[in-house]
Image: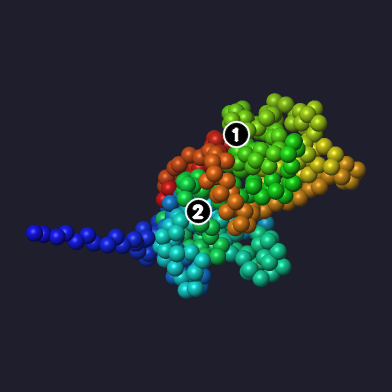
Amino acid sequence: MSTSIVAPVVSTPPVTPSPSTYRAAVVHGFGTPLSLEQVPAARLTAGQVRVKVQAAGLCHTDIHAAHGDWPVKPAPPFVPGHEGVGIVVELGPGATEVALGDRVAMPWLGYACGTCDHCVSGWETLCLEQQNTGYSFDGSFGEYAVAYSRYVVKVPEGVDSMDAAPLTCAGVTTYKAVKVAGTRSSNLVAVFGVGGLGHLAIQYAAIAGGRVIAVDIHDEKLDLARELGAEFTVNAATEDPVEAIQRLGGADQAIALAVSPRAFEQAYGALRRGGTLVFVALPADNEVKLPIFETVLNGITIVGSIVGTRKELREVFALHAAGRTTVIRETRSLDDINEAIADLDAGRVAARIVFTP
Ligand SMILES: [Zn+2]
Ligand SMILES: [Zn+2]
């Protein structure tokens, strides 16, 4: 008679050995195509983790980084990408907030000091010591990325990594913008620009109880906006959005997501008295012309909103896990990054491109 012995099931996290080099998309000079090449894997320092990237969204900020468009520039060579999601495969000294095998998101706010006035008051996004993923240090456009364990956010079960990637910047940024706007039930909210950010802003404004007006210059994006909950749409290429929105009574809040100063001015003009304009997009052209007199007499609030905190990203993931949001994205190989950037720049992308390494 034979007996069979069943070996105990040992649960090992899905961890692969850390590499000495990995393939990544590198910016060598502003405005030149990114180069796909092997780069050395840096040794982890205190608090860092290595993540095997599963998905990485392409944000306009990555293109501005690669072009050196903004007053504060990154230093080539560097790897962009701040919508990375993947599995923790290595823990640096003192990295205790996550475990091997955890699935995490690596947002724009890659590091903050944790002790300044901003950090301790729930405004870590304003920390002067902050470092930004894919800008101050290498980002997620590669097979691996390094992040700080305190500043990654665990992705809950029920959220696809391909959805989690755009939520990591486009999602949390617009979620925060709607919070900053102060949208309450029945408010009229004008969302200028229906792209990677705008398609999510529409949904968060609706979740907050707002009635949404979507403004864009492409009819197919306005069709998408209606599918995602916009009650009104305005094609700014064929109709003056200021007139159209003022006919509806004016917007209580306007959220400027299009990378064009003209769209900011239109968003301002679309407000009703007492309204709030939220600046979110960062056009390469850094000037906007707004009137002082009307701002004072109409009691207008203008507020800038930059990404969101880890707490807010958790809220964004929770809403998505609960089925409250839809992420519109297409998947491409990282090998096609230069073509993807050209398509995004030319407005040929419905919402978000997500790379697989
Ligand atoms: Zn971004
Ligand atoms: Zn700080």
**Mark sitting on residue 213:** none
Q: Residue at x 51, y 57 (%)?
A: 154
**Mark sitting on residue 228:** 1
Which residue is at the front of the view, 270 or 217? 270
* Residue lying furthest left: 1
Q: Residue at x 45, y 59 (%)?
A: 102
Can residue 6 be seen here? The reply is yes
Please, what secondary structure does the residue beneath circle 2 have?
loop
To which residue does mark 2 refer?
155
Residue type at the position of mark 1: Leu
Which residue is at the front of the view, 195 or 10? 10
Q: Position of residue 142 (x, y in %)?
A: 44, 55
Q: Position of residue 218 (x, y in %)?
A: 62, 30
Q: Position of residue 240 (x, y in %)?
A: 75, 29
The earlier-in-sequence mark between 1 and 2 is: 2
Give the Cα distance between marks 1 and 2: 23 Å
Which residue is at the front of the view, 336 or 295? 295
Q: Is residue 108 above or below residue 150?
A: above
- Hey, which quadrant is residue 127 in on the image? bottom right
Badge 2 local density, few (<14 within 10 Å), some, or many (20+)? many
Q: Is residue 137 above or below residue 316?
A: below
Badge 1 local density, few (<14 within 10 Å), some, or many (20+)? some
